[in-house]
Amino acid sequence: MKILVIGGGGREHTLTWKLSQSPRVEQVFCAPGNAGTESCARNVEINPENIEGLLAFAQKEKIDLTVVGPEAPLVLGIVDLFQGKGLKIFGPSRKAAALEGSKVFAKEFMNRNRIPTASFRVFSDSRAAREFLTKRGRPMVVKADGLAAGKGVVVSKNLEEAIQAVEEVMEKKVFGSAGDRLILEEILNGEEASYIGVTDGETVVPMASSQDHKAVFDGDQGPNTGGMGAYSPAPVMNEGLNVRALKEVMEPVISGMLTGEGQRYQGALYAGLMISEGEFWVLEFNCRFGDPETQPILFRLQSDLAFLLLQAVEGDLKNANVKWDPRPAVCVALCSGGYPGNYAKGKEITGLEEAGQMEDVEVFHAGTRREGKKIVTAGGRVLGVTARGKDLRTAIDRAYQACAKINFEGMHYRRDIGKKGLGR
Ligand code: AMP
Ligand code: GLY
């Protein structure tokens, strides 16, 4: 099989790394990839949002399976485009991807399908939103409707902050038309976990559980990022919750998509859950694998990923059989100075080889670029240092030993990835 992976972050390096290990796969291409994907795929200079360019490439190279990493091409309709030309592609259609592309659609869909989620109101007028907040007199979660590169959600600490968020989204339009509508939502408290499944539209194959660390600083302080690290499994997702999330979230999504929206949901489906005292609520859906959750999850996957994704595309997941390494895995994101705000690029990275040679360690690249013989930073999240161990403690220690071997100017990372899991 020839496979094309779309995207150039840590998730995509992990996907190409895993897919290239399959005996069914002859060659993997990655568009645009990074300095890490070069070692297991051929990088192709095409932007993930240039879906016509990607189609032309897939047709020319006779790609057997395309795997879409990020949400933007899905929301633009890359799956509809490829399928219209008879090409196999892993991911949901444009309409089904609205589950991530429009938070208003997602919240209303959850209500229609009785999926537990925080109560909310939709606004298309900033004055009405301000008035509602003022009447309520307490902070709420403010969410821009459309895609905002992971920055469109503010969990406000007080009323002023909430009103300021409404202003930024609807009046200053910091996320452009993504802020034409917004949601005001009740704040939920608890512990978060990521529930990710692979589905063909009828059967959901759950991936191992995981937990992300969204805030930039230790102890979940500071602004949200794309994710500062993740580990798998997440003990907060006990057996009972895993079963309930499958029955009460994943299955209602695919059946609601099919019967209510006329869409067979095929691809990865990610539910961000808030868990408290044995109950859970869906915070958000993503129509793709998580980043950085994919790093520890696929590091533990023992089955053939290419075959699994092909089964999803071909509607054949009933027969899927997925095996996991029981050992926990931890991924620590090494980030550029200033991230998630502005940061410099082009800083030389050292120690990659030494860290990568450690047993049970894999250094997945995210924002990296080759510059002659050097590898330099090229994004906010630069590397995902991933390790496994006989228990979570060992995996954490090993991941941080590997981090200590790597350096670039301004590098920062959280020191408490996985810590919540140790407490359980
Ligand atoms: P994003 O992944 O950018 O959509 O951000 C969603 C994040 O915002 C979640 O991971 C939570 O940390 C937070 N969040 C969203 N909705 C709520 C809510 N109702 N209560 C508390 N936190 C929330
Ligand atoms: N790690 C969160 C996400 O992939 O959206």
Image (tube, rainbow, N blue to C red):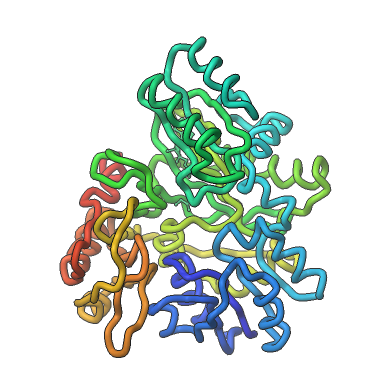
Task: State the residue at coordinates (52%, 20%).
Answer: 130
Depicted 331 relative to depicted 366: above or below? above
Percent coordinates x, y for residue 279 in the rendering: 50, 28
State the residue at coordinates (22%, 62%).
411
Q: From the viewer's perspective, is 90 left or right of 388?
A: right
Q: Position of residue 247 (x, y in %)?
A: 64, 40
Image position of 40 (left or right of 342): right
Q: Is residue 151 visible?
A: yes
Which residue is the extreme one toward the front? 172
Instruction: In the rendered view, tell whether residue 96 sits above or below residue 382.
Output: above
The residue drawn where x is 41% and y is 52% is 226
In the image, 77 versus 397, the foreground residue is 77
Residue 329, percent across and down? 34, 60
Q: For the point 68% across and 38% down, which residue is it?
A: 105
Q: Percent from the top left, x then y, of residue 295?
A: 41, 63
**Could you tell me which quadrant the N terminus lies in?**
bottom right
